[in-house]
Amino acid sequence: MEMELWYTEKQTPNVGITCKVKETLWRCQTDYQELAVLDTFQFGRILLLDGMVQATAADEFVYHEMIVHVPMCTHPAPKTVVVVGGGDGGTVREICKYPSVEKVILVEIDAQVVEAARKFFPEIACSLDDPRVEICYADGIEYIRSLDSFCDLIIVDSTEPVGPAIGLFDTPFYQSVFKALKEDGILVAQTESPFFNAELIRNVFSRVKSVFPSSYFYLASVPTYPSGLWSFTMGSKKYDPQKPEGTFIPQNTRYYWPGIHKSSLILPRFVQELLE
Ligand code: SAM
């Protein structure tokens, strides 16, 4: 009988997602986290950090399109964008689709995530060499603190709030983000699952709300993330995602389109209650 290899991510102490593995392609301890790349039958290649799924070949498009196009199409013509985290390059790939974009700064703490993405996920990392992109290996918290009225959009494409990412979910960070943004700037952050991370979402939403004049929340379906229902929190100084002002709408997408933009902001009752 042929031996089967299975990988489980324990998403909570009581729930896991398990995939049948073809091959372990890479495994190492970086200065910040344990990094692994698996090839699986169901989802293709998977990037894991500290045992948690960051991206899979099969469903990364949902997350990356939604963290980028909702804010990008809300703003009339974003030129300068800063991404905090996002070392796999998927967020940068989606930002680079916009002709208005002049500069993208990727602030990733762990260079080895970028190296692994370039080697094992060329279809995700494909825009990291775009001439508009600058990669800065630094802690996003310190980097953002150093900026003043600098950019149109800040996207926090971070790991779960553990280790170096903890501060990315706190009020002082959102205050620095506010200062780093231009007078009509937008913040978007990935904020985990409303089913499994209700308290985190409640806290983050009220922190963003206390710093920005307007805050919004939207959802997308990502099968390999805990519970499959993923959330994004937006803080905006001027523009309203419900009345997007973008003149450029990316056509080469698989999840995002203007109808999804609108529907992602319409929330189930239990999520509305979470945010109240
Ligand atoms: N899409 C993913 C998700 O929701 O699971 C996030 C992917 S991306 C690989 C997350 C990146 O954030 C990691 O590569 C990690 O090294 C980086 N990161 C964590 N804390 C950071 C910080 N304080 N500054 C910059 N990057 C950070």
Image (spheres, rainbow, N blue to C red):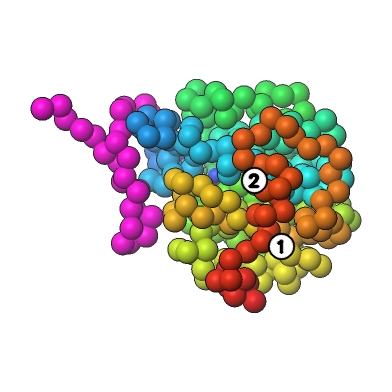
Q: Residues within 10 Å of mark 2 (few under 14, many from 20)?
A: many
Specify the quadrant of the image occupied by residue 1: top left
Q: Which residues are magenta?
A: 1-28
Q: Nearer the viewer, residue 30 or 26?
A: 26
Horizontally, residue 76 falls left or right of residue 33, namely right
Q: Which residue is mark 1?
A: 216
Q: CA distance from mark 2 to mark 1?
A: 14 Å
Q: Nearer the viewer, residue 53 or 40?
A: 40
Q: Nearer the viewer, residue 185 or 229?
A: 229
- Can you say whether 237 is above or below 156 in the image? below
- Can you say whether 202 is above or below 251 in the image? below
Horizontally, residue 145 falls left or right of residue 159, namely right
Residue 23 in the image: state x and y as whole percent.
31, 27
At label 1, the amino acid type is Tyr
- Assign a secondary structure to mark 2: helix
Pick the quarter of the image with the C terminus. Answer: bottom right
- Can you say whether 241 is above or below 28 in the image? below
Q: Which residue is mark 2?
A: 66
Residue 225 in the image: state x and y as whole percent.
46, 49
At label 2, the amino acid type is Met
Residue 32 in the image: state x and y as whole percent.
47, 44
- Assign a secondary structure to mark 1: strand
Please give the name of the residue rendered at 69% of the width and 30% of the height, measured from the top-left corner.
252
Dominant secondary structure of the residues highlighted in magenta in the image: strand
Q: Is 275 included in the stretch rendered in magenta?
A: no
**Quick check: can you spot residue 19?**
yes
Q: Is 25 included in the stretch rendered in magenta?
A: yes
Q: How many numbered marks does the figure carry? A: 2
